[in-house]
Image (cartoon, rainbow, N blue to C red):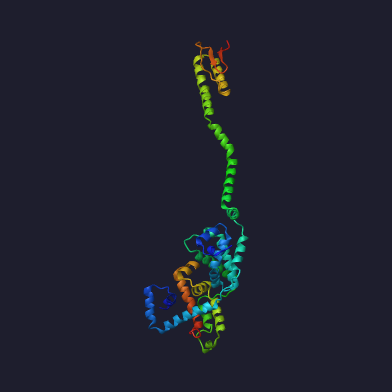
């Protein structure tokens, strides 16, 4: 029972236990005295412990806190917070957005230019046409020319076409003679007759 | 400047502002809990100057670790726990007190002019206070903290358990032990 006297004094027992202790106290002098002593002890301890002198306590704490190194995000937040006190939050936000926009433009512009140049429709179709010509022409020349020289010439010409102006398109091959290649170049408005060297 | 509306501001908002580095908001929290935090430290170290220094350190640690504070426990309990841990560490580190355990403590405390002899009835109140202080100092910091947190600070058993990070049953047994060893001093004189 003595173990329950303290919690009884503190009101920390379950209701049925409180009732049990109360019934016991009604007929037990020693437990009643012990309970009185607990109560007196509490009063003495409260008297014994004076209220601490706390004048200037919080100011000291804040002064010590203000001397602590602050994380960078807190300093930035506090800067804009202070700015908004004086100028208004609109200006602070505008400044922040402008700063982000400038940084973004500086970082992204070179990449944006490169990206745009790759994506122009005219440029892409021209490249496609040149590539097509460069791959299709040697095959056709090879069909018409029987000799090794003709094939080499066709390859050389194909390379020349591919590496030169992208508008240089060979419109057609006209020769029926296997050892002779004839084609038209519309850009220069000329017809080219190619004869291999005679052995 | 602080004003009444800010002082009455919601605690969660004050904590959130403090997390962002607003020391003025944290100052409001300091003023709100300073007395109790000092009380918790005082319960362990039993020296007012040390307790105030430890309480300041408690608030600084709390400010630095606000990001770790989760709302599972109340802010006040979190503060008291920091204070209790700092105070117990300090008390152990300083090691300038004589701590008596078990039988030694029983013997020493029984030599105090508690229930034995009529002379104790003549003990003055100030002398009684001195003896009570001495008896408190002879308790371990854990036992002293439990009884002072309960009797002086008025914390519940669950709060003490949370602050000192020990089971509720341990709180009850420590409290019983501390009371039994201190009540003898008041047996004759304090029976008023």
Q: Which quadrant: the N terminus of chain B?
A: bottom right
Answer yes or no: is residue B181 visible: no
Answer yes or no: is residue A89 visible: yes
Please state the horizontal and vertical placement of residue B71, each as a whole percent of the image: 48, 60
Please state the horizontal and vertical placement of residue B107, each as a whole percent of the image: 52, 80
User: Which residue appears at 50% of the width and 79% of the height?
Assistant: A43
Please state the horizontal and vertical placement of residue B30, each as a whole percent of the image: 56, 65
Residue A8 image-quadrant placement: bottom left
Q: Is residue A91 above or below residue B78?
A: above
Q: Is residue B36 above or below residue B71?
A: below
B182 vs A174, nearest the viewer = A174
Q: Is residue A4 left or right of residue A197?
A: left
B120 vs B139, nearest the viewer = B120
B108 vs B153, nearest the viewer = B153
Outermost residue to the bottom: B118
Please state the horizontal and vertical placement of residue A40, each as a whole percent of the image: 48, 81
Q: Is residue A67 above or below residue B41?
A: above
């Amino acid at each position: 029972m003595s173990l329950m006297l303290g919690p009884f004094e503190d009101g920390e027992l379950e209701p049925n236990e409180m009732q049990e202790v109360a019934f016991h106290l009604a007929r037990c002098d020693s437990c009643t005295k012990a309970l009185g002593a607990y109560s007196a002890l509490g009063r003495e301890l409260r008297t014994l412990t004076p209220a601490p002198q706390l004048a200037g306590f919080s100011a000291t704490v804040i002064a010590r806190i203000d001397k602590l190194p602050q994380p960078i995000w807190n300093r930035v937040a506090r800067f804009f917070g202070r700015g908004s006190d004086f100028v208004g939050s609109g200006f602070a936000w505008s400044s922040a957005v402008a700063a982000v926009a400038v940084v973004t433009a500086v970082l992204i512009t070179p990449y944006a230019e490169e990206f745009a140049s790759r994506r122009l429709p005219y440029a892409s179709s021209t490249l496609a046409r040149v590539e097509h010509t460069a791959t299709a022409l040697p095959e056709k020349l090879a069909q018409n020319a029987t000799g090794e020289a003709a094939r080499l010439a066709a390859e050389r010409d194909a390379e020349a076409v591919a590496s030169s102006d992208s508008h240089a398109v060979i419109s057609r091959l006209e020769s029926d003679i296997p050892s002779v290649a004839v084609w038209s170049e519309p850009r220069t408005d000329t017809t080219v007759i190619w004869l291999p060297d005679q052995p | 400047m602080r004003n009444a509306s800010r002082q009455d501001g919601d605690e969660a908002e004050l904590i959130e502002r403090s997390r962002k580095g607003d020391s003025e908001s944290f100052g409001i929290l300091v003023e709100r809990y300073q007395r109790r935090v000092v009380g918790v430290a005082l319960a362990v170290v039993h020296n007012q100057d040390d307790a105030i220094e430890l309480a300041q350190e408690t608030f600084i640690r709390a400010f630095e670790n606000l990001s770790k504070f989760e709302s599972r426990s109340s802010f006040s309990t979190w503060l008291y726990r920091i204070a209790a841990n700092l105070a117990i560490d300090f008390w152990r580190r300083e090691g300038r007190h004589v701590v008596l355990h078990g039988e030694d403590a029983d013997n020493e405390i029984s030599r105090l002019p508690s229930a034995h002899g009529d002379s104790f009835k003549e003990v003055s109140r100030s002398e009684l206070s001195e003896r009570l202080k001495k008896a408190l100092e002879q308790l371990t910091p854990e036992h002293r903290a439990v009884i002072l947190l309960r009797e002086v600070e008025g914390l519940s058993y669950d709060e003490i358990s949370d602050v000192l990070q020990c089971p509720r049953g341990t709180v009850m047994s420590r409290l019983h032990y501390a009371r039994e060893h201190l009540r003898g001093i008041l047996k004759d004189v304090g029976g008023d």
